[in-house]
Amino acid sequence: MAGKKMTILDFQKYKDEGRKFSYVTGYDYTMASIINDSDVECILVGDSLGMIMLGYATTVPVTLDDVIHHAKAVVKGAPDKFIIGDMPFGSYEVSAEDAVRNAIRLVKETGVDCIKLEGGADRADTIRAIVKAGVNVMGHIGMTPQTATSFGGFKVQGGTPESARKLIEDAKILQDAGVFSIVVECVPSVVAKAMQQEVKVPILGIGAGPDVDCQVLVTQDLLGMYGDFKPKFVKQFAHIREEMIKGLNQFHAETISGEFPTPEFSFNKAVEIPSVYGPGKTE
């Protein structure tokens, strides 16, 4: 149900109190308005919109203009939710100055509550600059889709003692750089648990097991709407795609048979239509 909107301070408060929360994606006004009526606290306008909404094979082609376009609609549709705007590939890698400029633009033009960007220690200086400029930053480590090809595709990260320790150290560095929370994607549960215990800011897990502060999923995945593939970590809490296809097929069948529309779905006011041949004339 819609209620008091979560704030930046609530993220840390929830972690400190051991209170878990949830976080889903949204890319358009209608879906945002549905999420707004739910108990979910946060919406990410993610660069996953490239795959879910635009049909790209990866998130890489998504532009800042794409994210801004979708984020504007989501902010309108979900006034009671904390909304995160994703920084797409190419919008923050060139320089800290470029990243600050793009982060400010994303916030100013959409009204999102914060931005999210991918990367560990290598992004610390960029994050510091954005935070110094007055923009709230959410980190993202583990499996980072924008650079997935550099580690062999969409694979679990932190599977060795060395890589697990590096992930935890990256999280600590991001914390010191000023992020207020960190998304951790596709890591072993034991690694995410250790991170949650060692890092002060909230850890938001997607495919990171049960011992994190918040669970994250793509809305179209958890509702069974996206049909291209289903990640291992996704539980489908509904099967909306099947219901939508069923409804479309029923509409088609009733159109062909003439069953639709009935008088109930027609305008039935009696209207006298003048003859096309004029008064007193017949064919």
Image (spheres, grey):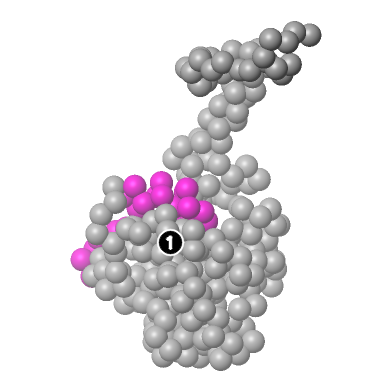
The one nearer the camera, 49 or 178, is 49
Q: Residues in magenta?
A: 15-40
Task: Name which quarter of the figure residue 4 lies in.
Answer: bottom left
In the image, farthest residue toward the right:
283
164 and 90: which one is in front? 90
Q: Is 283 placed above or below 156 here?
A: above
Q: Is residue 96 left or right of residue 24?
A: right
Residue 87 point in image, percent of width and height: 55, 73
Q: Is residue 268 above or below residue 106?
A: above
Q: Quadrant of the C terminus?
A: top right
Lateral position of residue 157 relative to residue 168, left or right: right
Circle 1 sits on which residue?
75
Of all residues shown, which one is farthest toward the front?
280
Image coords of residue 92 (percent x, y): 58, 82
Tell whether position 244 is magenta. Answer: no
Residue at 23% over, 70% down: 13
The answer to whether residue 10 is seen in the rendering is: yes
Q: Is residue 282 above or below residue 232?
A: above
Amino acid of disc 1 = Val
